[in-house]
Every structure is written in C-alpha cells, then in structure tokens.
Amino acid sequence: MIYVGGGVIAANASDALIKVAEELGAPVVTSVMGKGAIPFDHPLHGGLAAGYFGDTVAVKLVENADVVLAIGTRFSELGTGMWSLPIRGRLIHVNVDPNDMGRNYKTDMAIVSDALEFLNALYDRVRGRGRAGIGVLS
C-alpha cells in the first residue's frame, strides 16, 4: 500500500502517484498534509491514515500491509496521530529530506528523492507488469 504525505502535493506528483497506484493495484492512504493527492472518489483511495485521528479503514490498511511505501512524508506528530499509526510491515520511506529517514519510524529502505522523480522512475519500472511489478520493491 502507498502512504502519501504533503511532499507529493508539493512536487505536483499526484498524476504520477495515481499512475503507479493503478498499475500496482495498490491502495493509497494519505497523511493530513497529503489529503487531496488522490481524489476522494478514486477507487484506490483508502482514506486518511493519521493514527488515532485517521479513518479506521485507512489505519487498518497501513496496519495490515506487508509493505508500506511512504512517499513525501516526514511522519510528523500531527500526520501520524502522535505516532499512533501502526506500521508493522516493511517500510520504504521516500522523502526529499534525508534528516527525516528513520527519525520517527524504523525504515527498512530509505530513498532520498523528490516525490515526482521517484514516482516517474517507479512507474517506468512497473509499467506493464501490473501487480507482478510489486516485486521490484523488494
């Protein structure tokens, strides 16, 4: 599943995010700052995942995910409901600021990148592979 922060909006990467999510069939949840990165009526939109303050379905999507691909997020106190967002699966953290990596959540893979550049590169890797493309993340 994909967890989206405000960095996706700041990078004007919403279209690239949607292309990747659709190709992988991956649900997308947002932090408070990431709200609006994917239309609320998109079939892959899973809601606001902000720990205690988030949507129950969105929080459960994060909690039950084998892999959380977090893009453009700092995992701030507000964005995670005072760090109550339960990330139990492998965490791949993509953010432009290297100082945010592993600061609030244990990161299995840290990628320092602009959200748009990362999503475009990821789409190039998974295009045409559909759900089978998920293997490139491991």
Image (cartoon, grey):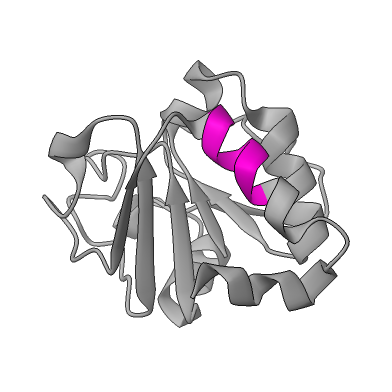
Residue 68 x %, y %:
45, 66
Q: How many marks?
A: 0
Q: Main secondary structure of the magenta part?
A: helix
* Residue 51 is inside the magenta segment: no
Q: Residue furthest right?
A: 128
**Residue 2: quarter of image:** bottom right
Res 44 seen here: no
Q: Is residue 100 above or below residue 136?
A: above
Residue 73 x %, y %:
35, 39
Residue 71 x %, y %:
45, 44
Q: Is residue 85 above or below residue 98?
A: below
**Residue 89: quarter of image:** bottom left
What residue is drawn where x is 16% and y is 55%?
Answer: 102
What residue is drawn where x is 26% and y is 39%?
Answer: 74
**Residue 107: quarter of image:** bottom left
What residue is drawn where x is 78% and y is 44%?
Answer: 19
What residue is drawn where x is 32% and y is 79%?
Answer: 88
* Residue 117 is inside the magenta segment: yes
Viewer-nearest residue: 108 or 65: 108
Numbered range of the magenta stretch: 116-122
Q: Is residue 127 above or below residue 117?
A: below
Residue 86 x %, y %:
30, 70
Residue 34 shown left or right of residue 79 in the figure: right
Quadrant in which the N terminus appears:
bottom right
Q: Is residue 110 above or below residue 133?
A: above
Viewer-nearest residue: 57 or 108: 108
Res 109 seen here: yes
